[in-house]
Image: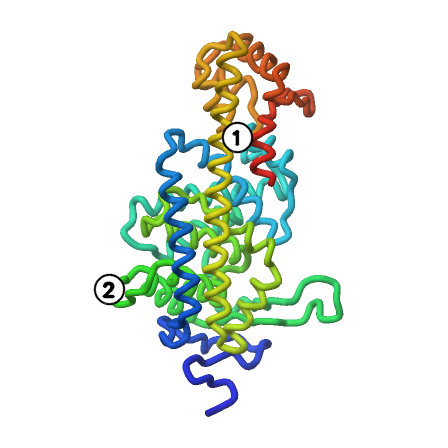
Amino acid sequence: MSENQLPNYKINPDREKPWNELPLLPIDDSLYRTIDIYEHLAEAKAALARLHGRSIAIPNQGLLINTISLQEAKASSEIENIFTTDDELYKAYSNNKIEEATGPIKEVLHYREALWKGFEYMKQKEAFDIDYLIEMYREIKEASDGIRPPFTSVLIRKGGSGPLAGQTIYTPPRGEGILEDKLTNLLAFMNDDHTYPLDPILKMAIGHFQFEAIHPFRDGNGRSGRVFNIHYLTHKGLLDFPILFLSKYIIDNKDAYYHTLAGVSQRGDWKAWITYILKAVEVTANLTFRKINDIIKAKENIYQAVHLHSDVRKVDQLIAVLFQQPFSTVKHFTSAKIYAENTARNYLNQLVEMGVLEKRTINGHHYYLNIDLYNILSD
């Protein structure tokens, strides 16, 4: 047996050479059928089920759609060293003009758009396809190309400024038809539950590695892969909406993420990688569950305070708008035909006096910050 041939998985011995021998799926079941992995799988499934049960009980889904997904977009972009502050992001989102955003803010907002466009795309589809992957990549990167051409040389290099910075750590496959063949195999594995009857969370973990190893696009593969993860869970009915805050765990455990990814290609260590992803699902499902509960509690408390201590009319509609995003403007209420402009401004200023909102003036425009919602999301 050669040095690059493990008992059940052929690894990538030369990091400088395209991994055209990346094994097709499925992997041998001995690589994941262990007691440890199935114990982690049970915990991940239980946490995801709790989140699913809680999210479908919320009457105003906009509370989740706009708040949790925006934080996921911000966190996923930070993994790729695309940083923006909460204030900058929420202000840009509240203006509802993605085309006017610039730099990192625009990239984060495009990631969020991909979350929702892909979610709607899959409502019309019975299975994932290459067109879906290209659509997500194009939305995330605001690009017009697709699968990278056979001649494109892509190297994954170690970041940072240490002595190993710039060193090649992985070279994805390339060549005529190679990426397309490997993507077709990946999609068949993810879509066909009869031929490949694995638990969907296990499939997600295995499929995520395979997607990142194929590295089908010139750029944006990490974000495209994480969007694919969430859409896969929603498509399989484990979530009703793409609200899993998965990227937060990866940020907090970024070194382990890249270490376990490399562990598969260099050592065939599928156990460490799958365990990492299962733990990520468990932790982030619990985190998102807690955030939802905290948001609901804050919403109820503010409703009671406004109802009892102000002359505000249409309190339900007011609170609903205030909890769709941290920053609100008078226009949000006039556009929704809830209040006239002067009435909306008067009510918002009353809530500022009550300590519910904080008024901020940015570039001559007035924004009203929902303090409790902002703190919950930023925690």
Residue 194 placement (x, y as % from top left): 24, 64
User: What is the number of callouts on the image?
Assistant: 2
| Residue situated furthest left in the rendering | 194
- Give, as a three-letter code, the residue at label 2: His
Mark 2 residue element: loop
Residue name at image x 57 percent, y 9 percent: 346
Along the viewing direction, whichever of 311 and 124 lies nearer the viewer: 311
Q: Residues within 10 Å of mark 1 (few under 14, many from 20)?
A: many
Residue 311 placement (x, y as % from top left): 51, 7
Q: Is residue 149 visible?
A: no
Residue name at image x 50 percent, y 73 percent: 264
Q: CA distance from mark 2 to mark 1?
A: 41 Å
Dot 2 corresponds to which residue? 194
Along the viewing direction, whichever of 133 and 278 lies nearer the viewer: 278
Q: Is residue 361 visible?
A: yes
Dot 1 corresponds to which residue? 325
Residue 30 placement (x, y as % from top left): 38, 77
Residue name at image x 65 percent, y 39 percent: 85
Q: Residues within 10 Å of mark 2 (few under 14, many from 20)?
A: few
Give the quarter of the figure containing the C terminus: top right
Residue 89 placement (x, y as % from top left): 60, 36
In screen coordinates, is 287 left or right of 50? Answer: right
Vertical comparison of 316 with 188: above or below: above
Mark 1 residue element: loop
Vertical comparison of 69 with 211: above or below: above
Residue name at image x 39 percent, y 65 percent: 38
- Give, as a three-letter code, the residue at label 1: Gln
Along the viewing direction, whichever of 231 and 177 lies nearer the viewer: 231
Q: Earlier in the sequence, mark 2 or mark 1?
A: 2
| Residue situated furthest bottom in the rendering | 1
